[in-house]
Amino acid sequence: MKKSIAVLSIVALVGVVYSCKKSASVTGGTAYLDLPSSTYTYFNSGFPDSSIGSPNKVATLGRVLFYDTHLSINNAISCGSCHKQALGFADNVAFSTGYQGKLTKRNSIGISDIAGVGAFFWDGRENNITNLALRPLTNHVEMGVEDYNVLSAKLAALPYYSNLFNDAFGDNQVTPDRIASAIAMFMQAISSNNTRLDEFANGNSSALTAQELNGKFLFDTKYNCGSCHLNGNGNGGSGGYGGGGGGGFITMPSFLDIGLDNSYTDLGNGVISGMTSKNGTFKVPNLHNVALTAPYMHDGRYKTLDEVLDHYSHNIMNSANLDSRLTDGAGHPMQKNITSEDKAAIIAFLGTLTDHHMITDPKFSNPFKVK
C-alpha cells in the first residue's frame, strides 16, 4: 500500500515538473524554469509535520521562490544571489549587493542546517524561520519589496506559479504566508551531514588523515575552539560543530564578543537584546562548509581561515564584553600564539567539515536556466 502511494505521489510530482517548464523575463536575459523529471530529485526527509500541504511539494515551490529574482522589486535579486549553493549558501564578498547596487550592512551568513536553530542573523533579530524568509524581501537594501500583497499579485501573474502553488497548497492562491512557508520549508531541507568529519564520527576511523586528526585535537583541546563551537549535545569535539550529522544542531545559539575591536562600531546583539553586556556580541556560526564561506566574521574582515587564526593567535582586542574564554588569568586578552604548523593542521581539519554532496545536490540548485 505504501509503495502504491509513493508511486502515485511521484507521478503527480512529475506532472507538476513538466508543467513548470515555462519562461520568465529576468534582468540580464531570459530565464526559464527547468525542472526536468530525468534529473529532478525529491525532498523526502527531515521535515516537520505540516498541515499546509505535502512537504515535498512545498519545498519544491520554496526552491523556485528562493532562486526567483521576481521576488525583488526590480527583478534583480533573489535569495540565492546572496546565498550561493557552491559556497555553503553564503557569499564570497564581505557585503552582498542589493537590488539597487547598494551593499548590505553585514556579511551573508551561511544558511545550511538552520532547522531547529533558535535565532537567526548575526545579531539574532529573528527566531522564527518563516519570518526569516520574509525579512530580506522588505529590506530596503536587499530586495526592496514595499507591499507583500503587491508581491503576491506579481508572482501570481507568472505562468509557472499556478501549478506549483496548487500542488503545494491545494489551490493556486499566492499569499505572503504561503511564500514564506515555502521558502522556509526549502531552507529547512538544506542540511550538511555528509562531511568526512561525519564519516569519522559515525565510525570510519580512516576518514581523516593524521594531520586532520591532529588539527581536530588542537581545535578541541589545546586551543579550546570547541568550547564555543559546540555540537548538538552541548559539547565540543567530534560531531556536528554547530551543524548537521554526528552532533546535531545548536538549538540555542550563543552570541559572543571575540575581541574584534577595542571600540564597537556595530553593537550586534546588544541592539536586539537591549543589554549593554551584549554589545559587540554576534552569533557563533555553524562551521559546516567553513572552508567555503570566506570572508569571515559579521563584517567579512578576514579573507582566509589563516587570518581568522591569526586573530585568535595574537590579535584579540580588549573589548568591553570580551568573552572570558578569550582572556588570560589576569583578565587580559589571551594570546594563543598558534604556531604555523598548528594553524595548518587546524585548517586541514576544518576542511573535513565540507559537504561536497550538499553543494552539488540538484535539489538545492537554481532551477532557472538563462538563455
Image (tube, grey):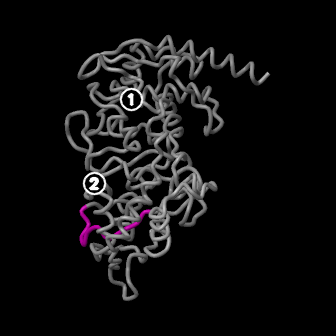
Please report the bounds of the magenta region as a residue range.
255-265
The quadrant of the image that shows the C terminus is top left
Query: Magenta stretch containing residue 207, yes or no?
Result: no
Counting labels gives 2
Q: Determine which quarter of the picture holds residue 52.
A: top right
* Mark 1 vs mark 2, CA separation in Å: 24 Å
Q: Residue 354's x, y, as percent? A: 45, 49
Q: Earlier in the sequence, mark 1 or mark 2?
A: 1
Q: Residue 287's x, y, as percent? A: 44, 55
Relative depth, front residue between 252 and 234: 234
In the rendered image, the vertical position of residue 154 relative to residue 255, given as above or below: above
**Residue tagged 1:** 67
- Which amino acid does the dot numbered 2 rest on? Gly
Side of 71 where 213 appears, left or right: right
**Residue tagged 2:** 300
Q: Residue at x 40, y 20 (%)?
A: 155
Badge 1 element: helix
Which secondary structure is most common in the magenta stretch?
loop
Relative depth, front residue between 343 and 148: 343
Side of 342 where 54 appears, left or right: right
Q: Residue 62's x, y, as percent? A: 48, 29
- Which amino acid does the dot numbered 1 rest on? Tyr
Query: Magenta stretch containing residue 262, yes or no?
Result: yes
